[in-house]
């Protein structure tokens, strides 16, 4: 009897599939790229809302368990992106792989990154505004609001160097989730390989620029619409600085994965 087919493809096959997918993504029409980017920003925002909710209701749990639970909840965002279909900037940092193969040019890469990043930002902001409009910040007698503000304040309190390093680590895990999902054979298998890396980066408190596009405005909007005190260091300017440094870190982390697997599996082919 023949062995059953594996639930995930071999690494060199995944590298080829990722390269092909990234070429397709880099050459999408601008309108479709922007529309799919809006969806991805909102999808990741849904994961952010779930993570804030879990953090609000887990005050009696040990720190590590709370973080892991929030990470599992946040994984909803990447599951929606990869299974429903959307354009996520952090995943698209893997375009360094076809760039190294000279299958796309620097202009195509920068066009895709810029349009998708901006679309992700708009989608995330719209999601945060809808959450406030729906009154989610009033849930749990203020527990949700407190969780959102504290999380935003924690992110804006970090130094630039810390955010860059944290962003690199975060996107290495996110891109590994994207990488493994590309090789998974079914929707169930894809979910199974997405959740652990995503839960890990959230549990470790790492910086994901697209997640922060919803988490930081959410904390600021919640603070502005409630009687909660403004934590020291939390401001729109600080939120913008966080997005700058976390984006740079995410590019480094995604570039490490994309270029690393190009060198190991596709260089010379």
Image (spheres, rainbow, N blue to C red):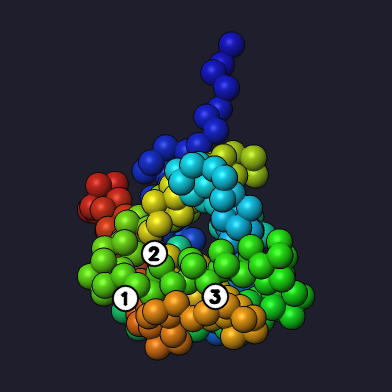
Pick the front one: 164 or 115? 164
Q: Secondary structure at mark 3?
A: helix
Nearer the N terminus, badge 2 or badge 3?
A: 2
Q: Label 2: which residue?
A: 207
**Where does the image place residue 160, in percent across and percent down from the top left?**
26, 74
Q: CA distance from mark 1 to mark 3?
A: 19 Å
Pick the front one: 19 or 225? 225
Going 58% across and 61% down the picture, which residue do you hit? 52
Dot 2: few (<14), some (14–19), or many (≥20) neighbours within 10 Å?
many
Q: CA distance from mark 2 to mark 3?
A: 16 Å
Going 57% across and 45% down the picture, which residue do you hit? 60
Dot 1: few (<14), some (14–19), or many (≥20) neighbours within 10 Å?
many
Marks 2 and 1 close (CB-CB < 8 Å): yes
Q: CA distance from mark 2 to mark 1?
A: 9 Å
Nearer the N terminus, badge 2 or badge 1?
A: 2
Q: Using the rendered view, name the quadrant where residue 80 is placed.
A: bottom right
Nearer the N terminus, badge 1 or badge 3?
A: 3
Q: Secondary structure at mark 2?
A: loop
Q: Using the rendered view, name the quadrant where residue 255 is placed.
A: bottom left
Pick the front one: 185 or 51? 51
Q: Label 3: which residue?
A: 219
**Where does the image place residue 1, in percent across and percent down from the top left?**
59, 11
């Amino acid at each position: 009897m023949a062995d059953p087919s594996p639930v995930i493809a071999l690494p060199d096959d995944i590298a080829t599939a990722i390269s092909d997918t990234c070429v397709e993504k880099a050459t999408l029409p601008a309108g479709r790229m922007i529309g799919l980017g809006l969806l991805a920003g909102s999808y990741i925002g849904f994961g952010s809302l779930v993570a804030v909710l879990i953090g609000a209701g887990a005050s009696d749990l040990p720190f590590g368990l709370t973080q892991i639970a929030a990470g599992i909840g946040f994984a909803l965002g990447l599951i929606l992106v990869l299974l429903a279909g959307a354009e996520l900037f952090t995943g698209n940092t893997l375009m360094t792989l076809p760039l190294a193969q000279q299958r796309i040019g620097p202009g195509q890469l920068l066009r895709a990154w810029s349009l998708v990043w901006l679309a992700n930002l708009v989608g995330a902001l719209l999601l945060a505004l809808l959450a406030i409009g729906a009154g989610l910040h009033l849930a749990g007698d203020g527990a949700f609001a407190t969780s959102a503000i504290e999380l935003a304040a924690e992110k804006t309190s970090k130094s630039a160097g810390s955010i860059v390093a944290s962003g690199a680590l975060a996107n290495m895990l996110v891109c590994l989730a994207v990488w493994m999902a590309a090789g998974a054979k079914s929707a169930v298998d894809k979910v199974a390989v997405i959740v652990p890396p995503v839960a890990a980066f959230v549990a470790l408190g790492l910086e994901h620029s697209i997640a922060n596009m919803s988490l930081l405005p959410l904390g600021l909007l919640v603070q502005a619409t409630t009687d909660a005190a403004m934590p020291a260091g939390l401001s729109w300017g600080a939120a913008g600085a966080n997005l700058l440094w976390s984006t740079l870190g995410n590019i480094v982390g995604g570039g490490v994965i994309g270029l690393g697997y190009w060198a190991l599996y596709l260089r010379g082919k």
